[in-house]
């Protein structure tokens, strides 16, 4: 008799939990796509991977050597 009562109580709670889980998954914002690139550092044979969003890659200077020359670092 006790198992019947517990089974009914659990079955009654299941639709509410499923509905609540569905509403929380709908409200999550979409994650930005990560773009990974291989990075070979000087003095090492191993390559490392750097993963950033496309916005972060766009904000980073592409050629650091030219950026240093333009900023007047080599007076």
Image: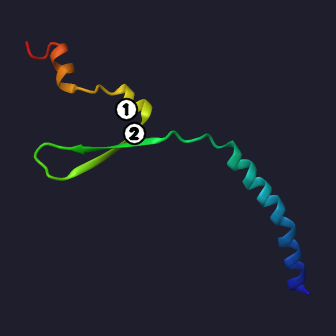
Please give the name of the residue rendered at 73% of the width and 55% of the height, measured from the top-left corner. 21
Mark 2 → mark 1, Cα distance in angstroms: 6 Å
Residue 55 falls left or right of residue 5: left
Residue 57 placement (x, y as % from top left): 37, 32
- Above or below, comparing residue 44 to residue 17 in the picture: above
Residue 60 falls left or right of residue 42: right
Marks 2 & 1, CB-CB < 8 Å contact: yes
State the colouring used for the structure image: rainbow
Residue 61 placement (x, y as % from top left): 29, 25
Q: Secondary structure at mark 2?
A: strand
Q: Reading the chain from its start, which is encountered first: label 2 or label 1? A: 2
Residue 27 placement (x, y as % from top left): 69, 42
Q: Which quarter shows the N terminus?
A: bottom right
Label ID, residue 57: 1
Label ID, residue 52: 2
Please give the name of the residue rendered at 87% of the width and 72% of the height, measured from the top-left corner. 9
- Above or below, comparing residue 36 to residue 71 in the picture: below
Crowdedness near tag 1: few (<14), some (14–19) or many (≥20) residues, C-alpha within 10 Å: some
Q: Secondary structure at mark 1?
A: helix
Residue 72 falls left or right of residue 24: left
- Above or below, comparing residue 33 to residue 2 in the picture: above
Q: Is 10 in front, or is 28? A: 28
Please give the name of the residue rendered at 19% of the width and 14% of the height, measured from the top-left corner. 70
């Amino acid at each position: 008799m006790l198992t019947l009562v517990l089974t009914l109580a659990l079955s009654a709670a299941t639709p509410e939990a499923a509905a609540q889980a569905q509403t929380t998954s709908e409200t999550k914002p979409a994650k930005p796509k990560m773009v990974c690139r291989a990075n070979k550092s000087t003095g090492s044979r191993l390559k490392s991977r750097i993963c950033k969003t496309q916005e972060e890659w766009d904000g980073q200077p592409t050629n650091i050597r030219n950026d240093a020359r333009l900023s007047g670092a080599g007076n």
